[in-house]
Amino acid sequence: MAAWVEGHVIERIQWTDTLFSLKVEAPLLPYQAGQFTKLALEQGERRIQRAYSFVNPPSSPYHEFYLVEIPGGELTPALSALAVGDPLLVQSQATGFLTLDEIPAGRDLWLLSTGTAIGPFLSLLTAGEAELRFENLILVHGVRKGEELSYQPLIAALKSQLGSRLHYVPFVSREPWPDAMAGRIPAAIDSGALQERVGLGFSPEQSQVLICGNPEMVKATQLSLIEQGLTKNLRRTPGQISSENYW
Ligand code: NAP
């Protein structure tokens, strides 16, 4: 059985009315960029728990999680109400396969996300290994409203570190937004608009694609990439498409 340890909130960032990040100190076992653990709060006799990915690189002295408050939800309103110094429970052993050691070699690493699922990709990018293994890093983030494009300071820092090797492509689907693409990620793959914006196409030889987010978006994006000639990456039959549903 997985062990729970007590952690404490050391910082919180409120991005919008519902989006927030928690930085937590807790004695966790070592983990890899792209993995997730569980956060929990005791409510009476019950322990309410949910899985959340690390946003930070594993070398960081704290653990950071990016969350959306689901109105009326069992856990997220209580997590959102936590203040600096408050305790919470964290599972000490992380898990998950959205890690670079599961990804075959390639030239271009595409990281396609929606909503809070950009978190594990920020961990992968800040951990530093992706830039050693891939020439081009493409971070794609789809949200409904422009204000949900969180982590701009971190993305700007990555951009100044990696220069033209990092392509950041925001999608805003429900309002016009400067520099963002309109609509949804799979439609932009089908039309070629995403490839045109980045200046790179998809190919089995050059591309590795990680998808994380809304389960419907994950499914639709997998189909679009299969149309582009890519295949799912399985341990027995390596391919180019790796994915994780975020809820
Ligand atoms: P979302 O509905 O996931 O939308 C984020 C982006 O994904 C939008 O641009 C949206 O486009 C696009 N999208 C939605 N369905 C798609 C599909 N089938 N194919 C391609 N793209 C698609 O919005 P969100 O704000 O991130 O999350 C919405 C709700 O999901 C939350 O409020 C919460 O209820 C739930 N959620 C739950 C958890 C959890 O852990 N349980 C975590 C995160 C979110 P459109 O604007 O065109 O729809």
Image: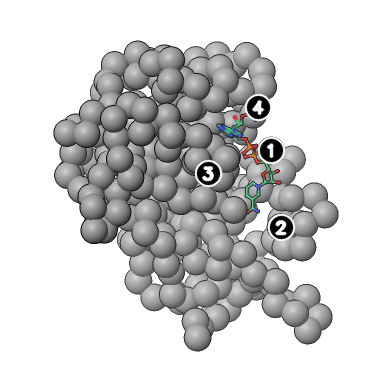
Task: Identify which residue is drawn at 50% across, 22% down.
Answer: 187
Task: Identify which residue is drawn at 43% across, 15% down.
Answer: 191
Mark 1 Cα within 10 Å, few/some/many (few <14, many 20+)?
Answer: few
- N-terminal-most mark, 1 or 2: 1
Which residue in the structure is indicated by mark 1? 16
Mark 3 Cα within 10 Å, few/some/many (few <14, many 20+)?
Answer: many
Report the Cα–Cα distance between label 3 and label 4. 16 Å
- N-terminal-most mark, 1 or 4: 1
Q: Is mark 2 within 8 Å of ligand 1?
A: yes
Report the Cα–Cα distance between label 4 and label 2. 20 Å
Task: Identify which residue is drawn at 59% across, 53% down.
Answer: 247
Task: Identify which residue is drawn at 70% across, 71% down.
Answer: 48
Report the Cα–Cα distance between label 1 and label 2. 14 Å
Q: Which mark is residue 76?
A: 2
Is residue 46 found left or right of 172 in the rendered image? right
Q: Which mark is residue 213?
A: 3
Is residue 174 found left or right of 4 in the rendered image? right
The local secondary structure at tag 2 comes to helix
Q: Is mark 1 within 8 Å of ligand 1?
A: no
- N-terminal-most mark, 3 or 1: 1
Amino acid under disc 3: Gly
Residue nearer the viewer, 205 or 51: 205
Q: Provide residue 206's location: percent of width, then percent of height.
A: 19, 32
Which residue in the structure is indicated by mark 4? 145
Question: Is there a contact, CB below 8 Å, between mark 3 and mark 2?
Answer: no
